[in-house]
Image (cartoon, rainbow, N blue to C red):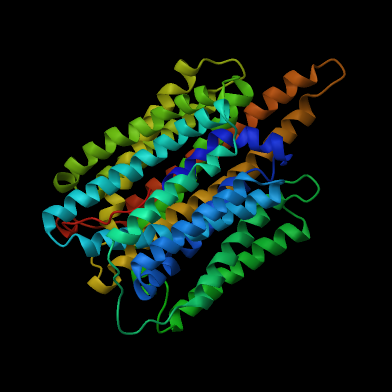
Amino acid sequence: MVVLDATIVNIALPEMQHALEISDSQRQWVLTAYTLTFGGLLLLGGRIADYWGRKRTFIAGAIGFALASALGGLAWDGTSLFAARGLQGAFGALLAPAGLALLTVLFTDAKERAKAFAVYGAIAGGGAALGLLLGGVLTEYADWRWCLLVNIPIAAIAIFAAVPIVPESKAHGDTRYDIPGAIAVTLGLISLVYGLTKAAEPEYGWESGQTLGFLGAGAALLIVFLVIQRFSKNPLLPLRILLDRNRGGAYLSSTLTGAGLMGAFFFLTFYFQGTLGYTPVEAGLASLPVSAGVFISAGVASQLLPKLGAKPLMVAGAVLAAGAMLFLTRIGVDTAYTTHVLPGAIVLGLGLGFTFVPLSSLALVGVPQHDAGAASATLNATQQVGGSLGAALLSTFALNATTAYAESHLSPTADPRVVMGEAAVHGYTVAFAWGGGLLVVSALIITFLIKVRRSDLPTEGAVHVG
């Protein structure tokens, strides 16, 4: 349910935008409101699950997620939808780490735990693909609101099964929370994304006081967060986790990869439905080759990781993904899916799979046992935060490019509909180019920062929601 919700709304976005009259500059909040609160509160959610009780947190998270989904399904304007998505992310930040912690605690036998994690990983990976397809089916044959309301029966089943079956477990000892740190990092990230949104609006732009103010406030709050982590006795994110060059490189790479992945799905959705005229179901099917590529390369990477180590696979993955994004810049108003999208989509998925699998192991390299949970959760959070910042940043670049193209090509003799269609596609290609650039930077970071050897990798990688 948590992974499903990160992708199911992608296909429904055009319908949501039209029904609730959401502007182009604001539409990315449907995604970022969810991923920001999820990523920003994930570390705190893990602590709450450990201290308050994992079963109790799991049930509370599922109930809250269902209620937030109901609010989103009944949304009457963009603001109410964004608020519901933010609440979904917040309760997801309770639900995801509690569920994973329960698996760790309940399955003590090594073989049984391996099976449990394998099922968990398959469901997490399949959830992303299912979200794309289910989003199309629900949008086309029911209503876009069901992309949110579908969570209610799923949550109900999980709750009614958990109450009699799952035993309670919790950590003991010092159970204080780093509430100031959680507030600072979440508000800082929201302020950054809001500043990027303002930069995309013609009446503001990059040089306006509001844009610079929100960007500056976001940066200041993130600095405050680091200071809090430095002096807190119970930090959400112990800085020793970040300062190791291998983990630091892995987290930077994860952030940039999350940005590229979110940008690809976000703009391909609008290209499929707005430009190529696909139905929601067709758009969902057209997006599946990315997921297929991830499944294929993830399986190959898990076999090659013990033999080659993390670094070669991650560099190859980043280069493949960057090349795929640059390939997608060739799309046009009337280009064919099979020649201009499908090859790039498959290669993008292959690149992402080669990147994600080694990241799980790198997150635990040299981490003491008591920091393992925080290190794994941080990796998950960087992917979500990267997706949020990437969607906001690439949306700003795309909208600015679209506006500039339209202004330079509109004339008394030009057909406005044709020009605006071409302008929209031009914006998408600019976003793909920038996304490819972010993935190139990721490849460089992996090359120069990560020095881990094959023998340094832990035998049991972290399992996380991608």
Judge by depth and name the residue closer to the eye, 380 or 38.
Answer: 38
Quadrant of the rendered structure where residue 376 is? bottom left
Residue that appears at 38% across and 28% down: 346
Residue 174: % across, % down: 35, 84
Judge by depth and name the residue closer to the eye, 127 or 358.
Answer: 127
Q: In the displayed structure, would residue 303 be above or below residue 335? A: below
Left or right: where does residue 135 sit relative to residue 393? left
Judge by depth and name the residue closer to the eye, 123 or 332.
Answer: 123
Residue that appears at 38% across and 34% down: 291
Left or right: where does residue 96 sit relative to residue 16? left
Quadrant of the rendered structure where residue 163 is? bottom left
Left or right: where does residue 354 sit relative to residue 95? left
Left or right: where does residue 392 sit relative to residue 257? right
Residue 253: % across, % down: 39, 52
Judge by depth and name the residue closer to the eye, 374 or 137.
Answer: 137
The answer to whether one can see residue 51 in this image is: yes
Q: Residue furthest right?
A: 412
Number of numbered discs? 0
Residue 153: % across, % down: 46, 45
Q: In the displayed structure, would residue 67 be above or below residue 176? A: above
Residue 187: % across, % down: 59, 66
The answer to whether one can see residue 437 in this image is: no
